[in-house]
Amino acid sequence: MSHRFLLATAGLGLSILTMPVAAQQQLNLFNWSDYIDPALIEAFEDETGIDVVLNYYNSNAEMFSKLTAGGDAQYDVIVPSGYFMPRLIGAGLVQPLAAEGESLPGREAILEEFKTPDYDPEGRYTVPYLWGMTGIAYNTETWPDPQPSWALLYDPEVNDAQPFALLKGDAQFTFGTACAYLGYGFDCVGKEPWIEAARLVSETRQRDNFVGFVDATATIEQLARGTIQAGVAYNGDLANKLAESSETYGKIGFFIPEEGSQRWVDVLAIPARAPHPEAAKTFIKYMLRPDVAAQLANYNRYTTPNKEALALVDPALREPPVMPDTQTRQRLVSTPSVSGDTLQLLQQLWNEAQSR
Ligand code: N2P
């Protein structure tokens, strides 16, 4: 029996002898890669006696397909982007965090603007984890002073020869980048803008310098290696890598295109058939603690939706480029949640855009 397990059960006295090894002593966390400080996991394990098993994904689409393939009975906590929640709720893949009319203790620490979001109006299914922005990451030696525009990816006259990538994984995301460039706004929804976006993505794919659809985290690695010169990435991922090694990542720049982009919120949720739902709630309550939320943000270089944590984070996280200035904020929109026929149309156009 591990030392940690003994500690956790010491208070239970003799009953331990008659109990099977507690089923709640494990937590299967399914998270984006490189998205939590390992020290936070260790501290949680030490404090609670719960062993954390980590599994990773790199896009909402990847997470969604694992959940529908049985992952909803395998994982205890997932970290989808907020706009993905209605799809998960609609497909019966997540469970409420608290009974109706009740709320999870610790929720009061959340900033007002994140308490009753569109994707979960009563705050029954989610607790916000971190928020950030999507933009273009590029090689500053190739483009010392680029126009901050999606044209760097979509206009062959702006970039006729340098290798570049588009974002893999989620239709709405990549169509958002195309829609913004075409003037429909990143939060475009509906047949007309999506057909145009699909056409643009499809044409772009056929350019000689298009390398492929690449996940945002991998985009940064490919930029560092020189495989690509421009792609789509998230602000904190780059900041985190820069803090790790300015030598490897120092030549990568980042901007929020002037035509607009996305501000996303990632959330904690519990899959419908999670094997350890109580451990999951213990973990979510832990993540709501201001000191823990601040450490999470400091490590990841993303912005915290936790009001009390905001006072505790590294001051650099309360300033640009991590915290957008007023001008940048005006260019940011949330991705709207779509469902039913609209979602089907989106998937169909996305499949076509990737294969035609
Ligand atoms: C993980 C970044 C994930 C944020 N490295 C995307 N919403």
Image (cartoon, helix red, strand yellow):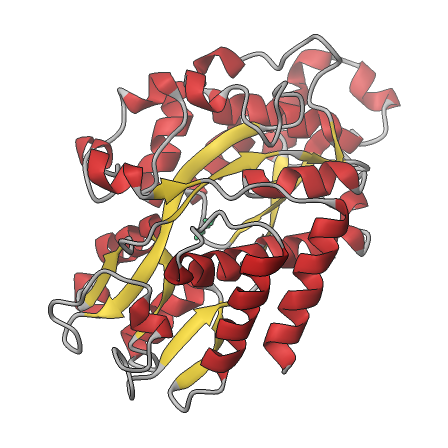
59 shown above or below 151: above
Picture quarter with the C terminus: bottom right
Q: Residue 273 location in percent, x, y?
A: 82, 37
Q: Is residue 188 above or below residue 269?
A: below
The residue nearer to you, when weighing 99 against 21, is: 99
Q: Residue at x 46, y 40 (%)?
A: 334
Work out which quarter of the rendered image holds the N terminus and state it: top right
**Residue reaching furthest to the top:** 101
Residue at screen point 79% across, 52% down: 68
Q: What is the count of numbered marks?
A: 0
**Is any part of residue 347 visible from this angle?**
yes
Q: Position of residue 34 (x, y in %)?
A: 44, 53
The percent position of residue 45, horizontal first and vertical second, equals: 55, 33
Residue located farthest toward the right when viewing the structure as drawn: 18
205 with respect to 78 (left or right): left
> Looking at the picture, does residue 109 appear above or below residue 348?
above
The residue positioned farthest toward the bottom in the image shown: 208
Tell me which corner region of the image, top left, top right, bottom left or bottom right, holds residue 268: top right
Q: Nearer the viewer, residue 38 or 277?
A: 277
Residue drawn at (74%, 56%) of the image: 344
Residue 318 position, x and y percent, is 22, 31
